[in-house]
Each structure stands twice: as C-alpha cells, then as structure tokens.
Image (spheres, helix red, strand yellow):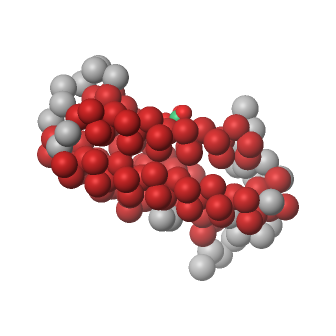
Amino acid sequence: QFQKPEDAIKYRKSAFTVMGSHFGRIGAVVQGKAPFDAKTVADNAQIVATMSMLPFAGFVPGSDKGDTRAKPEVWTEMDKVKAGATKMQEAITALNAAAKTGNLDQIKVAFGEAGKTCKGCHDNYRKD
Ligand code: ASC
C-alpha cells in the first residue's frame, strides 16, 4: 500500500490536513467568524466525513520515525487508537447528519462533540 514509511506518514498527515481544513471552516461558522450558509457547511461536513475514514491506514508499522508528531504509544496502544478513531468517525457522521438538516443549533452541538474526539486523540497520542 505504501512504498516506504515516509509515504505512509505523508499520506496520513495529508488526510488529517484536509480534514482539519474543512472542519475548521465549519468551526468558523460555529464561532460566528464566517457567515452561515447551510449548503457550504453541508459540503464541508461531507468532505470531513469522507476524509475521516482515511488517515488511520497510514499508521503502518515502522512509520513511527520520521516527519511525524505521532507518539510511540500509537503503535503500542493501537486498539485504543482504533477505538478513538471509530468514536471520531461516529461523531463526524452525526455532524454530517446535522449539517444536512441545515439547523445551526444542531450543527453547533455536533461540532462541539466532534471536536472533543479530535482533541482526545491529540492529547494522548500527538506530541506538542
Ligand atoms: C479543529 C482542529 C482540530 C480540532 C481540535 C478540537 O478545528 O483542527 O484538531 O478542532 O482542536 O479541540
């Protein structure tokens, strides 16, 4: 799937970067820093949902060294990481559903819940 560990690192970081960019665009709306357009939020939520499926395939054995902020615990606690990933994907699915309703209050709640799942993994498994 990946020729070398660095390719896997680049792949997962790229997926996280795109996911974070589109999640952040929803965040700007939630925080009142960007105008609420239901279609734009729904489009962004769909991209986040699709991207959220991708990064974890990039945490292959041997890709713990190199241009990565992933802590070694990612590989020794992979079952916990995978469980966290599933929780995140579920929260993003809920955000995507909320976005499709076009109800900003629902979007705000779902966005907050999804953000917690991002942070949970970052706190435990990402350096700095
Ligand atoms: C974001 C983003 C994250 C999460 C996290 C939530 O917008 O890029 O990783 O929210 O900061 O606490």
Which is more toward the observer, 16 or 42?
Answer: 42
Q: Residue furthest bottom?
A: 1
Q: Quadrant of the C terminus?
A: top right
Q: Quadrant of residue 79?
A: bottom right
Q: Quadrant of residue 9?
A: bottom right
Q: Is residue 119 left or right of residue 70?
A: left
Residue drawn at x 31%, y 53% is 96
Which is more toward the observer, 60 or 66?
Answer: 60
The answer to whether one can see residue 40 in this image is no
Residue 101 in picture, x, y percent from top left: 19, 48
Which is more toward the observer, 102 or 1?
Answer: 102
Residue 36 in picture, x, y percent from top left: 18, 31
The answer to whether one can see residue 54 in this image is yes
Residue drawn at x 83%, y 53% is 72
Q: Residue furthest top?
A: 33
Residue 81 in picture, x, y percent from top left: 69, 58
Q: Is residue 9 left or right of residue 109?
A: right
